Image (cartoon, rainbow, N blue to C red):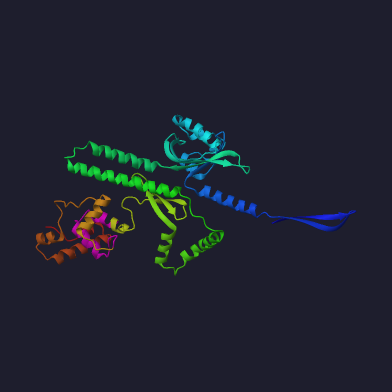
Amino acid sequence: MAITASAIRDDGSIIGISKIARDISSRKDSERNGARLAAIVESSDDAIIAKDLNGVITTWNPAAERMFGYTEREAVGQSIRLIIPESHQDEEDTILNSIKRGESMQHFETIRCRKDGSLLPISVTVSPIRNKAGVIIGASKIAHDISDRKRAEAEAQRAKRQYDLVDPENRLVASELETRWNRALQSVTELESRVQTLTQAPPSISLEQKKQLLEMGQELPRLWNDPQAPVELKKQILRTVIAEIVAQSAPESTDYRLQIHWAGGVHTELVVPRNKRGLNSRRADGKVLELVGELVKVCDDRMIAITLNRLGYRTGQGNNWSVSRVGTLRHTHGLAKFEKRADWLTLEEAAQVLECPLGTVKWRVAEALRQVRAGLHAKEEENVPCLYP
């Protein structure tokens, strides 16, 4: 309610006050509805565009920026023909004439042009915009990208043509083509079902229900971060608020792009870096890789596995090392396989040549290593017992 108070005067003296009260509930409702509609337009995944009767763009939502490549500043004030290819310019005349007659156009499939010049198949719904007096002053357009559906339809038609050209006697080829055809038709059906779901008006909620949902949303971070919140509860929350997650990644891409489709209809894009080849949470310890790089110079995979196990190292999955696992590690990191030199001897072979126990050979090797570590001079090193005859 809006109240206007005025003084009542008699010969210049105030003798009373007059009040005028006006009911403004309808105006407040209009303001709330306007704010709600603005939020829907801003968060919509479909391009929502408004234009006047001359075809000049007056509003351009964020989805239109993503779909056509033009920013709001670039598009507003320009003719809608900016995104219409030359071969479809006559469509705009037909649309404007229909709008001026007060007619709407539902799910009209056509082609539009992006800023980079590429063509985009869309489904368009156009409705007239009226002022308070009921006079038509423009048109609103909702454009939905149907590229995925068109690709699926083209794949289904191609599969059908291939199937029709195959000799019926060639049953193996015909069966494979029939399977591909049916798979493509199923993809078309699923996409058409999703389009139909998206075009249906979402159920409305009361202001009280909206208030309760907002209060619950404000409590969600505290509930999620509570150390006593069980994992099962968090999984249930995710299943409730997320409708689906669509992952997109090209082989040459350095990241994954995730489209999170929330249950309320809003979509969020999340970019996740992709691990480099050989780098993941289960990769072997860096010390292991460094050690294996040195061991391959002097011993084979069997001895490397034995050495790693004795030193207490494990694979990235917590397993003991084996010959096959060492071989896989070498192959992954490009480490060459050990090739024994003709003039090299193992400890066992040295014991056979010297005709002495293996323990004696090991002792001599250990003693030689100890003297080297002590930093003996060249003359002193000449006194080290020879290990070979």
Q: What is the quadrant of the C terminus in the image? A: bottom left
Name the residue at 50% across, 33% down: 94
Does the image show residue 129?
yes
Residue 129 x/y as whole percent: 57, 41
User: Dividing the picture into quarters, in which one does residue 364 lie?
Assistant: bottom left
Q: Is residue 370 above or below residue 67?
A: below
Name the residue at 65% across, 55% down: 25
Name the residue at 36% across, 48% down: 190
Does the image show residue 368?
no
Residue 18 x/y as whole percent: 80, 56
133 to the left or right of 308? right
Residue 76 x/y as whole percent: 56, 38
Q: Is residue 372 above or below residue 57?
A: below
User: Dividing the picture into quarters, in which one does residue 145 lie?
Assistant: top left
Magenta highlight on residue 293: yes
Q: What is the quadrant of the N terminus in the image? A: bottom right
117 to the left or right of 154? right
Pick the residue in front: 115 or 77: 77
Residue 109 x/y as whole percent: 43, 38
Q: How many marks?
A: 0
Pick the residue in front: 96 or 365: 96
User: Dividing the picture into quarters, in which one does residue 19 lie?
Assistant: bottom right
Q: Is residue 261 above or below residue 65?
A: below
Pick the residue in front: 210 or 279: 210
Magenta highlight on residue 269: no
Part of the protein shown in magenta: 290-317
